[in-house]
Image (cartoon, rainbow, N blue to C red):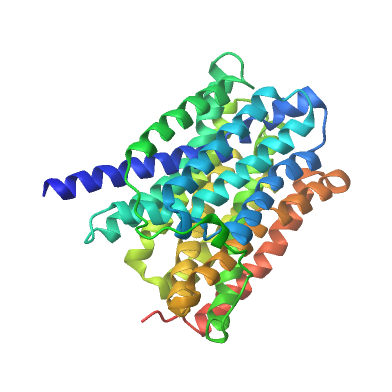
Amino acid sequence: MDGDRRRWRQCVLGGAVFAVCMAGTTLPTPLYGLYQEKFGFSELMVTVIYAVYAFGVIGVLLLAGNASDAVGRRPVLLAGLAFAAASAGCFLSADAMGWLYAGRLLSGLSAGLFTGAATAYVMELAPRDGSSRATLVATAANMGGLGCGPLLAGILAQYAAWPLHLTFVVHLALVAASAAVLLRLPETVAERRPLSTVRPQRPTLPPGVRAVFGPSAIAAFVGFALFGVFTSVSPAFLAESLDVHNRAVSGLVVALAFFASTAGQLAVGRFGVGRSLPLGCAGLLAGLALLAGALWWDQLSLVVASALVGGAGQGLAFRGALSAVAAASPADRRAAVISTLFVVAYTGISVPVIGVGLLTGPMGLEGAGLVFIGCMAVLVTGAGVYLLRRPVRTG
């Protein structure tokens, strides 16, 4: 019993380290308006700066996504924390736009290292019969950390001094504390190999996975695209169209989407994978419709409703997609297939966001947002209809 308590304590501490790293990736969200005032760049540049993060994640997933299986979880996570600290240092030093690009890229490298390794680490630290609760810890740490980032930054930027610096000083302190915690936690990979044995992973799909992967990947793509738009341009929309200049409110709206995603992921256990995927697609479609209403009628309440409904739909769809794809994959190809799903998802958080930024100039933020919503609605409706006609079976 004492051993189980110790392992649960280690599991929770590992989840706390995970949350700190992920919070760092969303810290700049409420601050983009301040950076625009400081450097005078356009809304397109906001989306490009945001999307650089996703390119960093994708690069790590493709080049070193399986590194922690070889060299161990702790060395990879310590490297991820080092990248997170370097990212915070870039933002603290930012006296030109290049620092923002560098900070976002380093943040993406940090998240890419953490995404798979920290999830596995949290699961492995838990007692053997606690996989379900460990999944809850990992899910809450990942999405909860992403949600805490803009909330923390928004509160500090609104109510404390040095809005472009204090946030990252606080995060550096949290990263240092996380490194100290991580050094006291045990390694869970018994047989370690040299880093030279790690090889780039080519996106791959065995024939038996393709029927499940297509609609699952579309749902993941749309869910991450919705999050991408929320975290990159929603503060500008709140300020320009709704006259909401309180950065704590902007951070809270973005945070609600991530917190709702956590709830949606937890609900997969109740609904089952087969129903969660089409339900998630329906939630995403409803979230997109609410966002369209918010853009059309300039209503803050609809923005909040979109964050909650769309976030819950994203959580249902993404965890359902992950479970379905993992169940359909051969054991010896599962990691590669899941990495491919993450590559598609993070493409969704980058490419459509840049598209919105490109359209903002000629069409305005509302017009660009409506075009984005229309395209994503077509994709997620097609995936949802397919999943209703051919339900996913994981048994």
Name the residue rendered at 42%, 54% in the picture: 119
Q: Residue 129 at what x, y percent from top left?
A: 21, 61
Residue occupying the far left of the picture: 1
Residue occupying the far top of the picture: 161
Q: Along the line of sight, which residue is nearer the eye, 190 or 104?
A: 190
Residue 225 visible in image: no
| Residue 215 in which image quadrant | bottom right
Q: Residue 333 at what x, y percent from top left?
A: 50, 76
Q: Is residue 112 left or right of residue 328?
A: right
Q: Along the line of sight, which residue is nearer the eye, 196 or 156?
A: 196
Name the residue rendered at 57%, 78% in the picture: 385
Name the residue rendered at 67%, 40% in the picture: 104
Q: Along the line of sight, which residue is nearer the eye, 143 or 368?
A: 143
Vertical relation: 229 (above or below) 33: below
Name the residue rendered at 47%, 81% in the picture: 391
Image quarter in which the C terminus is found: bottom left
Q: Is residue 134 left or right of residue 353?
A: left
Vertical relation: 72 (above or below) 271: above
Vertical relation: 106 (above or below) 374: above
Q: Is residue 296 left or right of residue 249?
A: right
